[in-house]
Amino acid sequence: MKFPSSDSSLNSNLEYASDNVMHSPSDRPLHVLVYTDSCGLGGAEISLANLIATVSPAIEITVAGVCPTIVNAIAQRRSHSSHIIISDGVGSVLNHRMAFGRVHPDLIHLNLCTPWAGASALTAALSLPSTRVVRVDQLPLRTTDAIALWRTRMLCLRVDAHVAVGEASARRMEDFYALGRDTIISIPNGVPDRGALPPPVRPAGEMIVGSIGRLDAMKGHDVLLQAIAQVEGIRAVILGAGNERTALEKLAVELGIGDRVELPGWVDDPRSYLASFDVVALPSRSEGFPLVMVEAMLAARPVIATRVGSMPEAVIPHETGLLVDKNDSVGLALALRELRDRPDQRLQLGQQARQLALTRFTAETMATLYELLWYRLQETPQTNRLRVTRPKD
């Protein structure tokens, strides 16, 4: 199998095989410290948990972060892993530097929810002369704060490897922070395959569309409700919690679809709901590479997604799902109507979506690619972090 197609140099020039990445080139196991400064459990943290649960048992893993609940939730996914909690208050950089120094890992892998997150941890990690540093950006966002933008750019330019969760996300990050073309590589998020789910039996002209994600404006659930109001025979189940819940409930009533919309709240395992969904809709206004998209695909459910982030790299129009523009409730309504009236198309798209996800977006594929990256960094001479090469245009 080849590395998923990419324009970035690492992705385009390497082939990988498990027997090349499962063993440390030295006489001792590779020791990787994975870090998150998140205090909420979302897709980024679940992706990190999937990674440490799947990478080779020959790799020693330490989980570090600032929030005990999140660190413990991630660490419990891997037996024999250790974990540390670091104070993020006064003296945060020094606290991180001391904690990292005590662990003395070969590599620090920082999983960031926003590009400007984790500045203290990145600064501390880069101060360790013999430790390689990998940053992973889950969302391609640009800050309007001049100081945060400058700081983010300086930290990005000094890491040993910079990863985004999709090709489009990588290119946007390069542009947002003037990093130079092909300085960021793409490794999509992956989830464990739990098998396909049989399609639900449904009367003609009826369909249940599911959406999974926190209830905030970025996820575009209001656009989904506006689209459903235009199409008869469709019910929506939106799984998630957040501060937009009241607004969504009010909108559903105003649109006259209150009896066709369910908001069950947060669920620990959405797979039980996936079995009853005909289609999964992700009308996000901004996105990276959401895990729910891959979970739906592996369950053999077609996805209707917006053309944002790296979702179009998985949702291929009329092959694995349908794409619409963000904020386009009319386009989303047309897509819903098309799949409502074509159960045969829903089945075909779902099956093809599963095959693509099995090939490119499983936790095993993700873990293998990160292992390859980690080991290659160990084998490559380290550059001077005080001198940064001028980014390519």
Image (cartoon, rainbow, N blue to C red):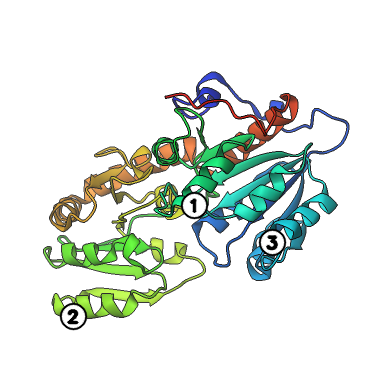
Foreground disc of the pair 2, 1: 1
Specify whether 218 is left or right of 111. left
Residue occupied by mark 1:
147
Q: Is residue 172 visible?
A: yes
Specify whether 181 is left or right of 333. right
Task: Classify 357 as above or below 87.
Answer: above
Q: What residue type is labelled 1?
A: Ile
As measured in the structure, the alpha-carbon distance from the residue carrying label 3 to the one carrying label 2 is 47 Å
What SS does tag 3 mark?
A: helix
Q: Is residue 80 visible?
A: no
Of residues 105 and 388, the one drawn nearer to the viewer in this rendering: 388
Q: Position of residue 131 (x, y in %)?
A: 76, 39
Tell me which residue sits at (25%, 74%) in the image: 261
Mark 2 or 1, nearer chain start: 1
Of residues 112 and 95, the one drawn nearer to the viewer in this rendering: 95
Specify whether 185 is left or right of 160. left
- Locate the C terminus and report the quarter of the image it occupies: top left
Mark drawn on residue 253: 2
What SS does tag 2 mark?
A: helix
As measured in the structure, the alpha-carbon distance from the residue carrying label 2 to the one carrying label 1 is 43 Å
Q: Where is residue 377 in the image (x, y as percent from the top left)?
A: 69, 30
Q: What residue type is labelled 3?
A: Ser
Residue occupied by mark 3:
92
Residue 353 lies in quadrant: top left
Tell me which residue sits at (34%, 75%) in the image: 263
Q: Position of residue 48 (x, y in %)?
A: 60, 52
Specify whether 247 is left or right of 191. left
**Residue at far top of view:** 13
Q: Residues within 10 Å of mark 3 (few under 14, many from 20)?
A: some
Mark 3 or 2, nearer chain start: 3
Of residues 134 and 178, the one drawn nearer to the viewer in this rendering: 178
As measured in the structure, the alpha-carbon distance from the residue carrying label 3 to the one carrying label 1 is 18 Å
